[in-house]
Image (cartoon, grey):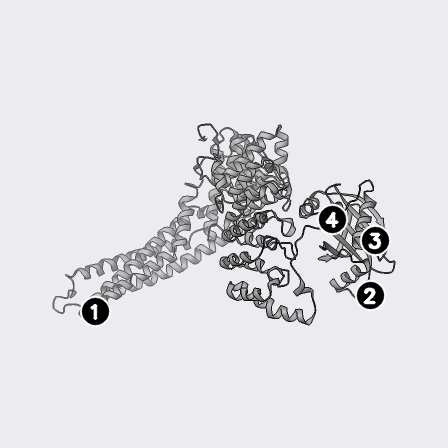
């Protein structure tokens, strides 16, 4: 007789305004149908390692009944002086388990007093009849209520505490486990021949069978041979958490093993595992995109709404956008679904927070027939196609603007979530289909443009170049409480995540000044000197908020200039000495250098002279940096330009110094073996290359802060707005 599978809770049960709650421990346990209540109490006592003075005072059966649409409770009071309560939770089947966990509400609470000699079957039947007296209770109804659709492997080698069973476990189960992990089929098969019952037995804690272990280790040959000696029912066995071996295969992403198992038992894709999830859910959770795409068509007919929504949101979180687009094209209601495991947001809320449009982790064949046109000025990422499709379905099914705004603002305003992370592609799809969103403001009366400035996202800020006269109105919006204008927001210090994109406090200061100047260009003259609620203009606020950064920038610039000036001085000293001490010596009669007419000597003379001139120039440039006043606006162009020219002259002086050294070494030692002077001359270029590689990030920041900000960054590039047409999307 198949045992009842149930969750056993031990602790304290409370009934309040929110229904019945439980505080304690939970374990899964198998209950024989003919067990008496006293037997059950002893098993629970041992299972939870209760103290001798902790006796069960109450056993409560919690039955999830999808037929009647209710959760039924029956409290079984056993004694007044015993202080531990127990609750048994059983389900009709695996599908009911998940459905009722999500949707059922408590409707009834009845009490019954069983006799200790009553069996579990009788107790459950009595409690069910007490709650629903009008229902005729048949054996079929009871089987659905008290028995979960759970396929348990043999537990003989785990539960049996006899010495013989323990010896068999050590001598057979443990080696079989190791052979399975190693993929050693020959050794494993020898154990099967001696102990055939191990093919379907649990061989380790957690109740995994050999097939469970082999499926998770990706040993294809082992699984292939194992499938030849077991039947289809053995493939449906579930471990202690309810997972079949096919769940492990789905999670591992090995399609070859999955295909072998599906050929033998096609229904494996429909058997739920732990937490009531299908194998396709395990594949999606582990990011096994190809596996999820292949399992979805085989499983979707068995889905209820909760299963479909769970898979859909899991695909979005794991970047399996192809499958997500395929799913929402099959069931358009997913566009309105709310994430049960998140903050109750829709798919668009999740996609809004993706900082960059990522390519899907795989391509589903079913998606090839789904064509969604997006902004032609941007790369056609599949995630933008998904955003476009979702937004289209939402706008088509909403009949009023107020409802649309309520949808996109709950639980969080997705427009401003997208602005905060700089998701320009997401905003492009939404605003192009519904331009009225440009007028949306947050709780502080800040528009999309205001938030883009606050979070320093130039790609979104450049929208001001596309919206025409609307811009002149939006830039006049002020924050409700602080009365900060758009220029005041630009005067605030950028978020740390944006500052970190630029290395060095001096370049960070330069970028901040560039932002302030750019926003100032589009502000009406009447608002430039407007004061906020703290009686501060934007200029005054900028000085206050950036004082600490300015001091750091000044210190960084001075230290850099001092080090570079020291190096330039050393180089100038060395090359000056080399100009006096001519390599190869002087002719005693003519007083001319001995190698005056040699080309190599001319190379030495020219490179040495250039090195001396450029190093001296570098000294003067870095000296001018040291004596600068370090005002705020000096960091925008003046100081970075000086540093660029100083670094260029320093690089030239180092390069020419090494050329002079190589030529001098060649002149001095060329009469010996040519290998040594040639080798040294080549190696002399290593410091030059090393200087270029090590200083490349500094060069990049210098050029970016001096020429990129203000000249390139704020120029309209990729259009955010576009018009959809039958012939194709057109950029505005």
- Which quadrant of the view contains residue 243? bottom right
Q: Residue furthest left?
A: 589
SS for dot 2: loop
* 465 horizontally vs 151: left or right: left
Viewer-proximal residue, 616 or 133? 133
- The image position of residue 245, as x and y in percent, is 58, 55
Give the mark toward the camera: 4 or 2: 4
Label 4 neighbourhood size at 10 Å, few (<14), some (14-19), many (20+)?
Answer: some
* 424 horizontally vs 242: left or right: left
Label 3 neighbourhood size at 10 Å, few (<14), some (14-19), many (20+)?
Answer: many
- The image position of residue 334, as x and y in percent, is 60, 38
Which numbered disc covers residue 143? Answer: 4
SS for dot 4: helix
SS for dot 3: strand
The residue beneath circle 2 is 53
- Which quadrant of the view contains residue 530? top right
Quarter holding the N terminus is bottom right
The residue beneath circle 1 is 669
């Amino acid at each position: 007789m198949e045992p009842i599978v149930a969750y056993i809770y031990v602790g304290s049960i409370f009934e309040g305004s929110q229904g019945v709650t439980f505080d304690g421990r939970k374990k899964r346990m198998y209950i024989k149908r003919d067990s008496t209540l006293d037997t059950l109490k002893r098993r629970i006592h041992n299972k939870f390692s209760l103290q001798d003075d902790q006796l069960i005072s109450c056993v409560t059966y919690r039955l999830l009944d999808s037929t009647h649409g209710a959760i039924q409770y029956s409290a079984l009071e056993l004694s007044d002086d015993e202080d531990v309560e127990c609750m048994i939770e059983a389900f009709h089947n695996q599908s009911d388990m998940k459905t009722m966990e999500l949707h059922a509400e408590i409707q009834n609470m009845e009490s019954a007093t069983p006799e200790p000699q009553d069996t579990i079957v009788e107790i459950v039947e009595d409690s069910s009849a007490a709650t629903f007296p009008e229902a005729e209770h048949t054996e079929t109804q009871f089987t659905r209520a008290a028995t979960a659709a759970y396929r348990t492997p043999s537990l003989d080698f785990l539960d049996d505490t006899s010495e013989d069973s323990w010896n068999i476990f050590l001598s057979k189960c443990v080696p079989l486990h190791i052979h399975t992990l190693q993929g050693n089929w020959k050794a494993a098969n020898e154990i099967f021949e001696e102990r055939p019952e191990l093919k379907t037995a649990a061989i380790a804690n957690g109740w995994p069978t050999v097939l469970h272990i082999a499926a998770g280790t990706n040993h294809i040959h082992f699984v292939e041979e194992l499938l030849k000696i077991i039947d289809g029912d053995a493939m449906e066995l579930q471990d202690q958490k309810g997972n079949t071996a096919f769940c492990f295969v789905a999670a591992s992403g090995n399609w070859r093993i999955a295909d072998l198992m599906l050929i033998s038992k096609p229904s494996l894709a429909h058997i739920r595992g732990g937490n009531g999830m299908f194998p396709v859910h395990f594949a999606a959770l582990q990011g096994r995109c190809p596996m999820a795409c292949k399992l979805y068509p085989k499983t979707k007919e068995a889905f209820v709404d909760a299963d479909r929504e769970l898979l859909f949101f899991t695909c979005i979180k794991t970047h399996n956008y192809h499958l997500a687009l395929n799913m929402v094209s099959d069931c358009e209601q997913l566009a309105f679904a709310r994430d049960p495991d998140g903050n109750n947001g829709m798919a668009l809320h999740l996609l809004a927070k993706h900082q960059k449009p990522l390519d899907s982790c795989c391509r589903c064949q079913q998606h090839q027939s789904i064509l969604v046109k997006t902004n032609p000025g941007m790369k056609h990422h599949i995630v933008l196609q998904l955003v476009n499709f979702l937004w289209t379905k939402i706008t088509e099914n909403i009949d009023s603007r107020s409802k649309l705004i309520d949808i996109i603002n709950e639980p969080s305003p997705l427009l401003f979530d997208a602005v905060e992370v700089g998701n320009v592609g997401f905003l492009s799809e939404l605003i192009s289909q519904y331009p009225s969103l440009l007028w949306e403001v947050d709780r502080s009366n800040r528009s999309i443009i205001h938030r883009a400035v606050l979070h320093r996202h130039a790609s979104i800020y450049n929208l001001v170049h596309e919206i025409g006269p609307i811009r002149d109105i939006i830039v006049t919006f002020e924050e409700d409480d602080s009365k900060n204008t758009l220029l005041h927001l630009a005067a605030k210090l950028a978020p740390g995540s944006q500052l970190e994109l630029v290395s060095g406090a001096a370049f960070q200061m330069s970028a901040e000044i560039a932002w302030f100047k750019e926003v100032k260009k589009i502000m009406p003259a009447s608002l430039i000197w407007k004061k906020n609620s703290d009686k501060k203009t934007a200029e005054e606020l900028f000085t206050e908020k950036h004082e600490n950064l300015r001091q750091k920038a000044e210190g960084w610039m001075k230290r850099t200039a001092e080090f570079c000036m020291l190096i330039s001085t050393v180089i100038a000293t060395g090359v000056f000495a080399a100009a006096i001490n001519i390599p190869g010596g002087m002719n005693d009669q003519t007083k001319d250098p001995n190698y005056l007419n040699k080309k190599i000597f001319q190379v030495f003379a020219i490179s040495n002279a250039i090195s001396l001139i450029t190093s001296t120039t570098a000294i003067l440039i870095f000296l001018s940096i040291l004596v600068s006043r370090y005002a705020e606006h000096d960091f925008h162009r003046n100081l970075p330009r000086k540093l660029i020219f100083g670094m260029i002259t320093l690089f030239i002086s180092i390069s020419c110094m090494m050329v002079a050294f190589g030529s001098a070494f060649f002149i001095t030692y060329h009469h010996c073996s040519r290998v040594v002077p040639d080798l040294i001359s080549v190696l002399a270029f290593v410091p030059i290359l090393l200087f270029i590689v090590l200083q490349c990030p500094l060069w990049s920041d210098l050029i970016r802060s001096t020429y990129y900000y203000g000249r390139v960054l704020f120029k309209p590039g990729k259009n955010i707005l576009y018009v959809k047409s039958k012939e194709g999307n057109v950029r505005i």
